Structures are given as C-alpha cells and as structure tokens.
Amino acid sequence: MDKLPGKNQSFWSTTAQAMSYPQLDEDIEIDTAVIGGGISGILTAYFLAKEGQSVALLEARELVSGTTGGTTAKLSSQHQLIYDDLLQQDGLDVAKLYYEANQEGQKLIKAIIDDHGIDCDYKVADSYVFSENIENTSSIEKEAEAYEKIGIEGGIADSIPVDLKVTSALVMKKQAQFNPVKFLYAVLKEVDSLGGRIYQHTRYMDSEKNGDQLILSTDTPFTVTCNQVVFATLFPAEDPDSFYSDTLKPVASHLTAFESPEAFDSGIYISDDDPIRTFRGALNGDQCVLIIGGETHPKGDGKSTIEHYEAIQHYAKEEFRLTEFLGYWSEHDHTTPDRRPFIGKIQTDNDKMYVMTGYGKWGLAASATGAGIIKSLIVGEDNRFEKLFSPERQLPEDKGDRNESNETDENHVVSPGSEQMERQLAKGQAQSVEINGKPAGMYKDTDGNMHYLDLSCTHLGCEVKWNDGDQTWDCPCHGSTFDGTGKVLAGPAKEPLRTIDSLQ
Ligand code: FES
C-alpha cells in the first residue's frame, strides 16, 4: 500500500519549535539519572531538581517525541470506563484512591503551569464517555453508579455538546486539556535553570554497581555515575526476573488531525464503542483543529494500520464533515493486569532503580502523581499513593494472552521471489518473506534502496510485524519499534534488527 496523504507526525510537535539539547559528551556524576524524555521523566527530573538533587535526564531520541507527544492530551480522571471495574476488582478504597491520584496529578500540572506562567492552551473542560450503540447503555449506567459510590462529580448526561447520535453518555465534571509539547518544553527550561542536565540522542544501555553507586553506560562513549536511576520509558530498560515482560502488554491507537471550522472546546470525548472513537478540539495559532483517534488494537498484530487511519478519516467525514486532513500518527502504550500503572521501586528491596510504566493510555495526569511518588521515595518522604501504583502489589491472574501470534496476517509472509517482488514494492514500504523457514523482511527506503532484515526482535526474539501506516516494524510481545531499516525507535530492544545480505 502507498503512504497516506498528510504528515505522519504528531499534531503537537508541529505547534512548537523543537528544543535542542546535546548528546552526552563527557562522563558525569550526579544524584539521580532519569531515563526517558516524556512527561514522566521530565516531571520527575523537575521535582527532584526542585528538592536540590543533581539530576540528568537522558532521552534516546528527541525529547517529548514518544507517547507523551502523541496523545490526545486530555488531562482527565475519566479513563473511559474503569471505576466499576476497580470497584469489583479492588474495592471502594482503591477505586477512590485511583480517582484521587489522577485528580492530584491534574492539580500538580496546573500548579506548575501557574507557577511558571506556562502558555500551553490549558483549558478546563468536562469529560464525556458516550456510546452510539444502545447495547452499551447498561455498562455506562454501571459506571455512573460507581461515580456515585466514589463521590465523583458527574453522572449520566442527557446529551453531549457535539452533534452525534449518542444513545447514552456519562460526564465527569471539570477535567482539562492542554498542549503537552508546549507544557513540557517550558518545564524542560525550568529543569535546566535548576541545574538539571538534559541530553538527547543518548540511549541507556546497561549499568554496573560501583560501591553504593551505579555506573550507567550509554550508546555514547560516556557514562553516568549516579546514586539511583529512574526508568521513565515506555517499557523499562531493565527487567528483573522478567516481571515487566510477563505483565505489560503493548497496545497501539491511531490519531489524526483535521482543520475544523468549529472549536469543539466544550468538552473532551471518548466512546465506549468498538472501534473506540476519541476526540477533542485544539488550536494551531488561530486555526481550530479537531484531533480524532481510536482504533485501539494489540501492537504489532500485523494488520494494516493504513486501514485504521482510513477508518478514522471516514468517521471524521461522516460525523463532522471534516476533510482538511493535517496529519496522522500512532500512540503506543502498555497495559497492566489490573489497569493501574507500575510506579515505584523496580523490584522489592532495590532502592537504586525505579520505574514508571504501564499507564494503559491514560498517563498524563497519573505521570505527575507518579513523578511525585518517585521523588518521595528518593528523598524519603511518605506518599499516600505509593502503594496504589507499587509494582510490588498483588496482581490478579493475567486476563489474556500476550500479543504473540502466528496467524496469517496482513503482513503477507510470502516466499522470496524475484526482482519483480522488489520492483513492485512502493518506496517507504516493506514486505515480510521467509528464508529457510525464518522470517525476513525487505524494506525499500524513500530513495529506492533495498534493506534486508532478520525480523527476530533483538529484545527476546519475537517476530516483528510491518506497520504500513507509520512505516515501522512493531514487536507484538513487548512493544519495541524499529524504523524500516531496523534502527531502534522504542525499546525495550536496545540493538537494531540484524541485517542480512539479500533474500537469496
Ligand atoms: Fe520483547 Fe520484541 S520487544 S521480544
């Protein structure tokens, strides 16, 4: 398939000038190293720097280029339908604390915005979950009952402020939306002014103990010596006893942006339907924009992602009469067995390594609370949300199979053929083939050069699948992403896909 029209780039990244920070260019020694330049890592670095710690923030690619820069950027405690599940699974106290943790995260973000006068299009808005399918009415009603038990401000809504034929809807009052890229670029400046060191294009590779300290190696010639390290990456860069490989499941959603004559700023929205639809208004200068997404699926399932984008485009045209397509992008995250993120010590009794992961696509408010938890753990304060998100908590039995699948999919594994197969491949696209029973891939770059790859993921060997919409190789097991030539875009893999000479 050919590429879609429009930019394959998050809308948010087009609204602010990218910030430039250096690669690590010397050995350094600091109190705390934070790995991962998304909202979790940046806020953790900020809170620790405010406590007087010396911190270094290391990002393998560009800051705010991963999941944080690709969300719908809703600051909401309404995580589609979750509270009835939490009540059934964990009881009232946990469900209430989960709500409070997310409300607290919103407050922390608003306080930073106010303290530093950050212009990031922050706006209070009611949050709605709706359905266009009568069969979903009872699940929305159950969630409304959970709101009442927990004391959440909101409940069943007779209508939503958007012209859609909804059959039921639930509102959570006074949530918010913002521009995460503008917000975090401003916070990075604060980290910088507090003496924090910030590095891009610096990938964490490994660590070794040196007395009470850790020496972190990177993909540069230089090291970071520190007292503790925080892994604020999509998937933790260390995985003791395979706990995170066994419990985190990668999911992908797809987002689009359209020019819009309307502001759509009276609310933020997500459906309880299949496929999911999520949308909110945004601004690019004076231009109103509608961000619409959904189509959530297990990452790396091998289905055509172009078809997901086209389904969203069709929805935008049918429901909102929008056709001025600005761009499209994917959002990747991991879910946990109990729908709560893992934030805390990476493993019991390890007070040198901390982790923040598994936000289940609802990580903006929770990451601020999480950054507060990590700061408390490191400086030795109590934090009332510590146990709620601790990776040490008791987990329910895993509710499903990992994404691994050997089913035939739309990656069309075929036997290697001739030059004809290579000629037929569009630039920027790839094809899975099989050589001696092993999966291999061929990718034609935008200059027309061919690249041949071993499709065994360099993390633990699962077969990566081609994502035609975003032109990446995605791993179904733990969510690593590689570009067409095999370069790592997102871990846990640290090494590129192996190249092979040719398909013959
Ligand atoms: Fe673990 Fe690919 S990310 S095997």
Image (tube, rainbow, N blue to C red):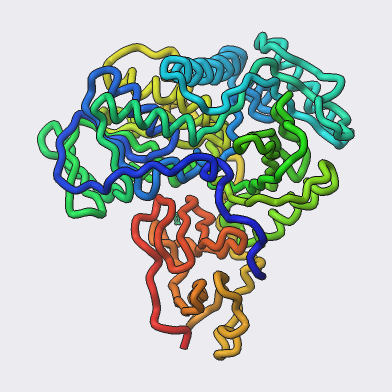
Please name the residue shown 50% across and 53% down the image: 477
Please give left or right for residue 408 compared with residue 218 in the image: right
Query: Residue 306: percent from the left, percent from the top?
Result: 67, 60
Work out which residue is located at the far left of the displayed protein and give it.
211
Question: Which x, y percent locates residue 381?
Answer: 31, 13
Furthest toward the front, the residue is: 286
Residue drawn at (64%, 56%), measured in percent from left and top?
A: 6
Residue 68 x, y percent position in the rendering: 50, 38
Q: Nearer the viewer, residue 395 or 111?
A: 111
From where the camera sits, is residue 249 visible?
no
Quarter of the image for residue 151 reads: top right
User: With 499 as the anchor, is 289 left or right in this view?
Assistant: right
| Residue drawn at x 62%, y 82% as measured from the top left | 424
Residue at 41% x, 19% y is 116
Q: Is residue 409 toward the left or the right of residue 396 in the image? A: right
In the image, ligand 1 is in what quadrant?
bottom left
State the quadrant of the N terminus.
bottom right
The answer to whether residue 179 is visible is yes
Vertical placement of residue 20 versus 365, above or below: below
> Total number of numbered labels?
0
Q: Which of the 4 quarters of the picture holds residue 76?
A: top right
Rendered location of residue 346, percent (x, y): 34, 34
The image shows residue 3, relative to residue 504, as above or below, that is above
Q: Quadrant of residue 128?
A: top right
